[in-house]
């Protein structure tokens, strides 16, 4: 399995949102998709925070 990147996580999160918005999935599958989406959203948030911190650190070096 490929290593999860921000871009791949965001793409999968967008797919999950579309699946949940269209509906028609059994409850258990919807809950699993929601859980996966929540984990991906947290991953993306952490990646953005890390990138922001790196940029701040680089800016402080000036």
Image: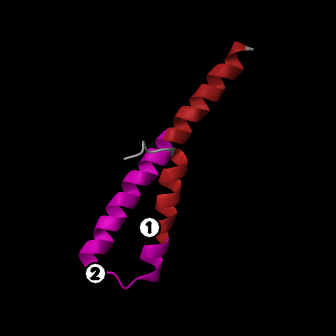
Magenta range is 18-46
User: Badge 1: how crowded within 10 Å, few (<14), some, or many (20+)?
Assistant: some
Q: Residue furthest right?
A: 62
Q: Give the residue displayed 36% in from the left and 65% down from the top.
A: 34
Q: Give the residue displayed 40% in from the left and 60% down from the top.
A: 37
| Residue 34 sits above or below residue 4 on the image | below
**Which residue, given by chain and number where applicable, does mark 1 sit on?**
16
| Residue 40 sits above or below residue 56 on the image | below
Separation (CA) of disc 2 from disc 1: 14 Å
Q: Please tell me whether residue 31 belongs to the stretch shown in magenta.
A: yes
**Direction from residue 47 to residue 58 in the image, left or right:** right
Between 60 and 31, which is closer to the camera in this rendering?
31
User: Badge 2: how crowded within 10 Å, few (<14), some, or many (20+)?
Assistant: few
In the picture, the quarter occupied by the C terminus is: top right
Q: How many marks?
A: 2
Mark 2 or mark 1, which has the lower sequence index?
A: 1
Q: Residue furthest left?
A: 28
List x then y, in percent, for residue 51: 58, 34
| Residue 9 sits above or below residue 32 on the image | above
Q: Give the residue displayed 47% in from the left and 40% down from the top.
A: 46
**Direction from residue 23 to residue 58 in the image, left or right:** right
List x then y, in percent, for residue 41: 45, 53
User: Which type of secondary structure does the marked residue at label 2 adopt?
Assistant: loop
**Which residue, given by chain and number where applicable, does mark 2 sit on?**
26
List x then y, in percent, for residue 14: 51, 64
């Amino acid at each position: 399995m490929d290593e999860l990147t921000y871009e791949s996580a965001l793409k999968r999160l967008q797919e999950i949102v579309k699946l949940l918005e269209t509906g028609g999935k059994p409850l258990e599958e919807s809950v699993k998709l929601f859980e996966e989406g929540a984990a991906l959203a947290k991953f993306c948030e952490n990646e953005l925070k890390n990138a922001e911190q790196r940029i701040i650190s680089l800016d402080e070096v000036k």
